[in-house]
Image (cartoon, grey):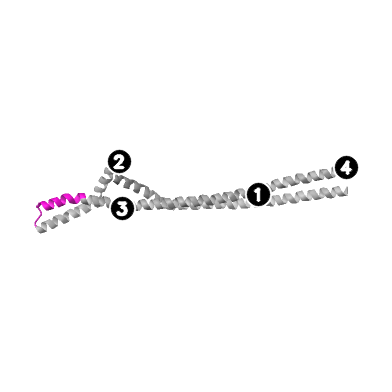
Amino acid sequence: MSFIGNAIGDVVGGITGAKQQAKAAEAAAGTQAGYAQAGIEEQRRQFDMLTELLRPYVEAGTPALQQQQAFLGLRGAPEQQAAIGALEQSPFFQSAVRQGEEALLQQASATGGLRGGNIQAALAQFRPAMLQQQIAQQYQNLAGLTSLGQQSAAGQGSSGMQTAGSIGELLAQKGAALAGGQLAKGSVARQSYADLQRVANTVGSAMMGGGF
C-alpha cells in the first residue's frame, strides 16, 4: 500500500510540476509573441510615416511625367496642343516675348532699320524660336520633377520590401513562440496521461499480486 501511495504521490507531483512548467512556457511564448507583434506594428508605423513624407514628391512626379508625355505628343495631338498653348499663353512667356520684341525694335530704331525687311523677318522668327526654346526648357524642368518622383517612389518601394521582410521574420518568430507554447501544453497532456496510465498499471499489478 505504501508503494502504491508513493507511486501516486510521485505522479501527482510530477503532473503538478509539469503543469506549472507548461504555464511558464505558455506565458513566455505569449510574451515573445507580444514583443514580435509590437515589432510588426512599429515597422508598419515607420513605413506609413515614410510614405507620408514621400507622398508630395511622388504626387509631384506623376503630373510632371504626364506633361512631358503631352509635350512629346504621346498623349495625343489635342493634349500636345493644349500643353503648348498653355505655355505660350503663360505670363512668363508673354513677358519674355514682349521684352525680346521691344529689344529688337529698339535696336532697329537705333540703326535706322525700323521699317526694313530684316526687322520684320526677325520679329516673325522671334516668337516661334522663343516658344521652341521655352518648350525645351519646360521639358527639362518637368524632367527634374519626374526624376524626383521616380526616386521617391523607388525609395518607397524599397522601404516597403524591407518592411515586408522584417514583418515576415517577426511573424515567423511570433508563430514559433505560439507554437512552442502549444507544444508545451500538449507535451504536459501526453505526459500526464502516461503517468496516470502508469499509476493504473501499478495499482492493477498490486491488486493482482495481493498487494492490498
Can residue 89 be seen from the camera position used here?
Answer: no
Mark 3 surroundings within 10 Å by alpha-carbon count, few (fewer than 14), some (14 through 19), many (20 or more): few
Q: Which disc number belongs to residue 140?
A: 3
- The answer to which of marks 4 and 1 sits earlier in the sequence is 1
Which stretch did the figure color magenta?
A: 112-128
Residue under the point 22% across and 52% down: 130
- Mark 4 and mark 1: span between their CA atoms? 40 Å
Provide the secondary structure element on which disc 1 rests: helix
List the residue tagged with mark 2: 76
Residue 117 lies in magenta, yes or no? Answer: yes
- The answer to which of marks 1 and 2 sits earlier in the sequence is 2
Mark 4 surroundings within 10 Å by alpha-carbon count, few (fewer than 14), some (14 through 19), many (20 or more): few
- Mark 3 and mark 1: span between their CA atoms? 60 Å
Which x, y percent locates residue 19? 73, 49
Which x, y percent locates residue 83? 28, 45
- Mark 4 and mark 2: span between their CA atoms? 99 Å
Callouts 3 and 4 close, C-beta under 8 Å: no
Mark 2 surroundings within 10 Å by alpha-carbon count, few (fewer than 14), some (14 through 19), many (20 or more): few
- Residue type indicated by callout 2: Gly
The dominant secondary structure in magenta is helix
- Residue type indicated by callout 3: Gln
Can residue 206 be seen from the camera position used here?
Answer: yes
Callouts 3 and 2 close, C-beta under 8 Å: no
- Residue type indicated by callout 4: Met
- The answer to which of marks 3 and 2 sits earlier in the sequence is 2
List the residue tagged with mark 1: 180
In this rendering, position of residue 111 left or right of residue 68:
left
List the residue tagged with mark 4: 207
- Mark 1 and mark 2: span between their CA atoms? 62 Å
- Residue type indicated by callout 1: Gly
